[in-house]
Every structure is written in C-alpha cells, then in structure tokens.
Image: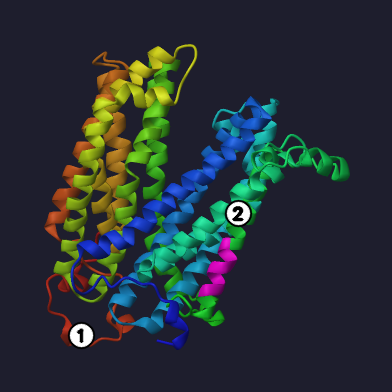
Amino acid sequence: MSERASHDRAVNVTDGALLKPLVVLSLPIVLTNVLQVGYNLADTFWVGRLGQPAVSALSFSWAIVFLIISLSLGFSVAGTVLVAQHKGAGNVDRVGHVAGQTISVVIGVSIVFSIVGYLLAPDLLTLVGAVPGTEEHRLAVVYTRTMFVGIPFVFGFFIFQSLLQGWGDTRTPFYLMAFGVALNVIVDPFFILGFQGNVLFAWVGLEGLETLLYDATGFAGFGVQGAALATILARGIGAAIGIWLLLSGRVGIELAPADLRPQWETVRTIVRIGAPASIEISTKALSVTILTALVAIAGAEAVAAYGIGTRVTSMVVLPALGLARGVETVVGQNLGARQVDRAKRGVLSAVGLITGCLLAFTVGVYLFAEPIVGVFITGDGAGVVTAIGGDYLRIVGVTYVFLGVFYVIQGGFRGSGSTRLAMAFAFIGFIVFRAVFAYVLAVPAGLGATGIWYGEAIANVSMVAIAGLYFLRGTWTGRVIDDADRGTDRRDVGEEGDSAVASGGLEDR
C-alpha cells in the first residue's frame, strides 16, 4: 500500500468483533440516505414557491429520473462486490483495476441513458400521467431533459460511494454527500428564483438586497430547470472530487488512468453482477406503481393515504437499507478472505440489530399512526385520509421488522455476488406476492383498501420466509473472484463453502 493511502478510513471487517464494524460501516450510509432525502426536500421547497404546476412537474419527472438512478445503482453494486472480495482476498493490486472498470462501465451506461432519456422524455412523462400540452408537461420535459444531460455527473458520485463502500470506507462518501447537500441548498434558491422574491435574503437579515441585485442584473432564475441545474452542479463537483481522491490514492484505493481502459472480461463480470442488481432495485419502485393502481380502485382518498404511508415506510426502513449495504461489504470481504462462517455471522448479527431497531419503530408507528399521517395532510378530506392512512400504518407497520430482515438478507446475497438470486427474491416478493395478495384481498374478497394493506403485510412476511430459508441452506456463499484473480494457492481451499466455487456455487448468480 502506498503512503498516499494515509487518509484511508476503511473499517476492518475481517478480524475481531462484527457488531461494531457493522454499525460503523452502516451508520454513515443511513445518514447519507437521510441527506438524500434532504436533497429532495430542498428542491421541493424552493420549487414550491413557483406554484402547483411546477411542483407537479417535479413529481412527474422524479418518477422517471429515480427509475434511471435505480438502474445505475445496480451497476454500482458490482463495484462494491468486486472491490470487497478482492480486498478480503488480500489482492489489493486488483482493486484499482475493478474500480476503474466499474467507473468506465457505469459512465458508459449513463451516457446511453442520457441520450435515450433526453430524446424520449416527452413520451416517458406522458406514460406516467403528465398530459401533453399542459404547463405541467412542459415544465416536466424541461426538468427531465436537463437532468438527463447531467446524469453522468449524478452517476459519478454513486460510483465513488459504492467503490469506497466495498473498500470499507463509508465515512468519506458521507462527508462528500454532506458537502453536496449544503452546496445544493445554497444554490437552489438562486438557480430557481434568481434575485427577485428570494426569501433567503430576508432569512439572513438582508431584506431589500434581492431587489437591488435584481435591478442590477435582471436575473430571475431558471425556474424548475434551476433545480436540475443545482443538482447537477452539486453532484458534478462531488463526482469530480471523488474521482480525484481515487486517482490520488488518498482513500486507500489506488486508481491509475490505465485502469479506466475497458477490458472485456472484467466488463462482462460487472454487467453480469450489475444488471440483475439494477432490476432488483427497480422492483421496489415498480411495486409501488402496481399497488397505487390497485389502490386507485378504492378512491382518491385511499391513494393519498397510500402515498403518505409509503413515504413513512421509506423513512422507517432507512436503517435497514443502510445496514444491508454494510452487510454487502462484510460478506464480500469475508468471502474473499475465505471466511464463510464469519460472512454468515455478519448477516445474522445485522438481522439481530435491525430487528431490535425496527421493533422500536413499529411500536411508535402503531401507537401514533393517525397523528403521523395527519402531519402530511390538512384541509378538505384530511379526516378520511388520516383514518385510512392510520389503518395502513397499523397493518403494514407490524411487518416492518420482516421487511428490514429481508433487506439485510438481500444484502448478504449481493455481497457474495449472487445478484440474480437477490433479483429473483425481490421480484417474487415485491411484484408477485404483493400484487397477488393485495388484489385477491381487495377485489374478490371485497376488502377494498384494507385488503391491499393486509396483502402488502402478508407479502412482507412471505418474502422474508422464502429468502431466509434459502439463506440457511448456505449455497449462496460462493464468490465471483477466481483463484487467478486472488493470486492465492488452490491448496488454501478448505473452509466451508469454498468448494462451491469449483462445484457450482455460482449457479445462483
């Protein structure tokens, strides 16, 4: 390791206790996810000052943009897995290579998404409900096309985050995300509103300055497009800093420009791991879309209640999502180091941790279901929506623990490189189980929206049951790096699960 790696913040997950490293790894990821929510809230707040059409345009656009970001995250998972397994195997000289190859693949994919998305933006927005010819559709097209132009910059940050996570360093990406959010919050009001009517000046005690600056410059902001430009600027700077840190070797991974030159064998491995992971991540968004269509049968109030309920659920499970990413690193590095039992114990430790955490959340959500929903809605129809949303949180909230455990187990599968396996369980759970149970209870059984809530709850329990049983089989513990990659002697093979590499342990991938 070069002296340039003196700022390496990687957590040791292959020796000693497991619980503390899991927490140290996962907490910054959870906080990073919270900051991501802050990113979105800042955009929504300032765009909200432009009026309802602008807010609606942002909602339509996010349905498209978030789907594309989900696809990119899947390919970034490949970087996490390969970096983690190579580091665990002690094959540090290969880490820079797979990091460079991941950057090239994801940036290449992002350029394709950028071009196709820009061209198809009007049609894609029509598919998600924006009516052509309306102000909402026009603004949504402008925002979406701007975001697609900047997609490579947005993807660049996620690549850096994933590579550092595989190395065992989640603090550096968190610091970079915090910087990006702060920058976004600062530039958002200027890019969106310009100097006219910008209340930020009043907040800092500089009333009247906005008028003076507007009179001098005439700058009235870019409107909805300004939100996209601010995001691209903040993420682009973050991505540039991240790539510079990798090339400088200051974060442990030593990346050389030559590592960015695509090599077919590595690219094929990245695609083989990343493509199923992209589909897996996308199933969650697709599940919400399917259930929303079912809920619509029960009326507009039920749709509003479901929207609030899913928002609360997405916040509650943030610790599980962060812990699942930490599990990817623990499993990846320990399988790379041939420590199969330790990899399994890492998953089980995370299961215990998230169970205790989500049990506490469940009690709070169950007891205060209606007040929680009431925070998100006022005015006409608020009482009906609050009652329906309260039912959703009490029914689905009881299964938060099961959903969290499912995420953690999926993290274990991904860490081993078994992304096709994780994809299969996600599809069965989020798409098949949820849709079938919800439909049967809502329509044939005649329970309406309440039937959909019970259907989602039953699906949460069922999906963790099938994934958990497969986890206990232990046949997922093969690796995606071979002996040549690891530079180790085949005679070292002997620990439980190592034979899976030679005898079909990759069959689930």
Is disc 2 in contact with disc 1, using a CB cutoff of under 8 Å? Answer: no
Q: In the displayed structure, does residue 281 sit left or right of residue 335?
A: right
Q: Position of residue 493 (x, y in %)?
A: 16, 80
Dot 2 or dot 1, earlier in sequence: 2
Q: In the displayed structure, does residue 315 sit left or right of residue 378?
A: left
Name the element at disc 1.
Answer: helix
Mark 2–mark 1 distance (CA, rounded to whole Å): 50 Å
Name the element at disc 2.
Answer: helix
Residue that label 1 marks? 490
Q: Residue at x 52, y 81 (%)?
A: 256
Q: In the displayed structure, does residue 451 sit left or right of residue 207?
A: left
Quarter placement of the N terminus: bottom left
Residue 361 visible in the displayed image: yes
Of 99 and 196, which appears nearest the observer? 196
In the depicted structure, whether residue 53 falls above or below residue 85:
above
Of 57 and 361, which appears nearest the observer? 361
Residue that label 2 marks? 183
Q: The residue under label 1 is which amino acid type?
A: Arg
Q: Name the colouring of the figure.
A: rainbow
Marker count (numbered):
2
Q: Which residues are magenta?
A: 238-245
> Image quarter for residue 385?
top left
Q: Position of residue 103 (x, y in %)?
A: 51, 68
Q: Position of residue 269 (x, y in %)?
A: 39, 68
> Image quarter for residue 62?
top right
Is disc 2 surrounded by few (<14), some (14 to 19) or many (20+) residues within 10 Å? some
Mostly what secondary structure, the magenta segment?
helix
Q: The residue under label 2 is which amino acid type?
A: Leu
The magenta stretch spans residue 244: yes
In the orientation shown, which residue stands out farthest toward the right?
A: 216
The magenta stretch spans residue 483: no
